[in-house]
Image: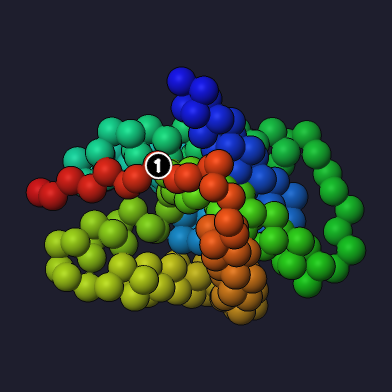
Amino acid sequence: MKKHIITYLLLLIGAVFQGVGMSLFLFPHDIPSGGAAGLAILLNYFFRMPLGFGLWIVNFIFLTVALKYFGYSWTMRTMFAVTITSITVSLLTTFVLLPHIHIVVDLVMGSIIFGIGVGLLIRNGASSGGMVIPALMISHSYRIRPGRVMFFINISIFLLTSIVINWKIVIFAVMCQSVSTKIIDFINEVELPMFSAPSLGWRKK
């Protein structure tokens, strides 16, 4: 029971970090941290849908479909993380206005904070949601490497976002992915025996 509480506490912290990085540093410049964030930005651009709600809707659709693939525990942990992240994004984009020094400073700060958050989520048996879900589903169905699938999905969304809003977005998005991925890898590789991650429950069709 104690381990369960610690796991969800760390998921809460990771989800808040993820939301802070996105809402205060990346979203003000329309920089997507991933494919789901890119779709949320497009929904906001076309339909004025709040970023936090758009992010939740995109992830909820994927998670509903993914339940049979990943199992109940992983899906519930990820839904919890996605919900906390969406609430954080909604609150911060509505009530907090942070002065922006320079887009590159915001990009680096946002990517680091986002990476810490996602690293904590993955380390504790959840996911940040987004395109990792359809990527793993497609990978399982067609025997394609999930990293390759996720790369092409994310790049496609980044390109669409850059065409619709600003061509520079794809460059900033790739830079964000590069920085945040290094942080995520560090969080997952650092030795913390007391916080062993729960296993991913995979279900075949």
In this rendering, position of residue 3 left or right of residue 59: right
Comparing 57 with 4, the one in front is 4
Q: Which residue is mark 1?
A: 198
Q: Residue 130: x and y, percent?
A: 43, 53
Q: Secondary structure at mark 1?
A: loop
Most extreme residue toward the left is: 205
Q: Residue 138: x and y, percent?
A: 22, 62
Specify whether residue 32 is in view.
no
User: Which residue is at 50% across, 38% downward?
Assistant: 81
Circle 1 packing at 10 Å, graded few (<14), some (14-19), many (20+), is some
Most extreme residue toward the front is: 193
Quick check: 3 above or below 19?
above
Q: Residue 12: x and y, percent?
A: 59, 34
User: Which residue is at 74% across, 50% downward?
Assistant: 24
In this rendering, position of residue 30 left or right of residue 66: right
Please, what is the three-letter code of the amino acid marked with disc 1? Pro
User: Which residue is at 59% across, 59% downward?
Assistant: 190
Specify whether residue 155 is in view.
yes
Quick check: 70 above or below 164?
above
Comparing 145 with 37, the one in front is 145
Number of labels in the image equals: 1
In this rendering, position of residue 24 left or right of residue 137: right
User: Which residue is at 69% across, 61% downward?
Assistant: 112
Comparing 192 with 173, the one in front is 192
Comparing 28 with 137, the one in front is 137
Image quadrant where residue 114 sits: bottom right
Quick check: 85 above or below 27?
above
